[in-house]
Image: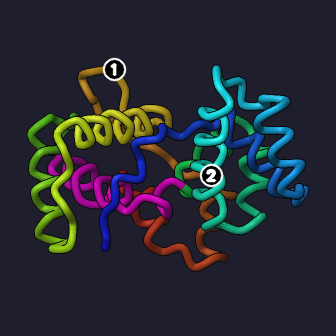
């Protein structure tokens, strides 16, 4: 299956991703992971269950990339860490990547300055054509996915203006470009370079 609703757990979560990347780089044991996530609550969540869910969600994203990207997440400045998290999120969620590649790129190519609810609705319909195995998303799930994807685009700088969904150009940092090229992440790179 090409499309899954695996973006409903959260947006980029850069602050939390820095913490998780640090744990992954030090290769903590399962017991240490449990202690840090649940007992020490390094993600500062209200419940252990929430901490576990967010930690596992972020780890599943970052595991798709190499430790070189984890270091950019952990030690990079705000923009570097954000773009590194975006790269991992695109690799983790094809819906996010294709939305950037198809819809956002399409708007830039047409010299349009915003996204609209109709564009999202048409995109979801198109997903069902591109992936016949995809089950229809319940309305609440589709709305949550749209909210999180637009929040990600806002955090990464592709959107501004809050609910107006105004588009703006984003320059990908040289260290992110280098990482993606060196690791043959052509799809992720294409999705991030929609404003070119």
Location of mark 1 (residue): 162
| Point 62% across, 34% down: residue | 49
Is 153 on the left-hand or right-hand side of 137? right
Q: Percent x, y for residue 157?
A: 46, 36
Q: In this view, does 12 lie above or below 62?
A: above
Q: In which quarter of the image is the N terminus?
A: bottom left
> Gap in Å between the C-alphas at discs 1 and 2?
23 Å
Q: Quadrant of the C terminus?
A: bottom left
Q: In this view, does 169 lie above or below 26?
A: above
Q: Does the magenta stretch include residue 181?
A: no
Callout 1 environment at 10 Å: few (<14), some (14 to 19), or many (20+)?
A: few
Location of mark 2 (residue): 84
The answer to whether one can see residue 196 in this image is no
User: Could you tell which of marks 1 and 2 lies nearer the N-terminus?
Assistant: 2
| Point 59% across, 42% down: residue | 53
Q: Percent x, y for residue 68?
A: 77, 64
Q: Percent x, y for residue 174?
A: 65, 57
Q: Main secondary structure of the magenta part?
A: helix
| Point 17% across, 39% down: residue | 139
The residue stretch that appears in magenta:
89-111
The answer to whether one can see residue 29 in this image is yes
Is 110 on the left-hand or right-hand side of 94? left
Q: In this view, does 50 lie above or below 138?
A: above
| Point 68% across, 36% down: residue | 16
Q: Percent x, y for residue 170?
A: 46, 44
Viewer-closest of 183 and 169 = 183
Please identify the quarter of the rendering in which residue 40 is found.
top right
Viewer-closest of 62 and 55 = 55
């Amino acid at each position: 299956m090409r499309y899954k609703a695996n973006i409903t757990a959260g947006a980029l979560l850069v602050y939390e991703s820095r913490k998780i990347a640090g744990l992954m780089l030090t290769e903590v044991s399962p017991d240490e992971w449990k202690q840090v996530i649940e007992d020490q609550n390094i993600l500062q969540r209200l419940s252990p269950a929430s901490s576990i869910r967010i930690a596992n969600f972020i780890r599943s994203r970052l595991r798709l990339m190499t430790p070189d990207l984890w270091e950019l997440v952990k030690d990079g400045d705000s923009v570097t860490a954000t773009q590194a998290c975006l790269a991992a999120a695109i690799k983790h969620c094809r819906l996010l990547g294709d939305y950037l590649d198809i819809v956002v790129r399409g708007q830039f190519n047409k010299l349009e300055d915003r996204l609209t609810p109709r564009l999202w609705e048409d995109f979801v319909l198109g997903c069902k054509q591109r992936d016949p195995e995809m089950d229809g998303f319940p309305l609440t799930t589709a709305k949550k996915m749209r909210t999180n994807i637009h929040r990600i685009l806002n955090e990464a700088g592709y959107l501004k203006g809050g609910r107006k969904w105004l588009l703006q150009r984003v320059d990908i940092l040289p260290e992110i470009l280098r990482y993606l090229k060196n690791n043959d992440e052509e799809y992720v790179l294409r999705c991030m370079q929609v404003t070119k």
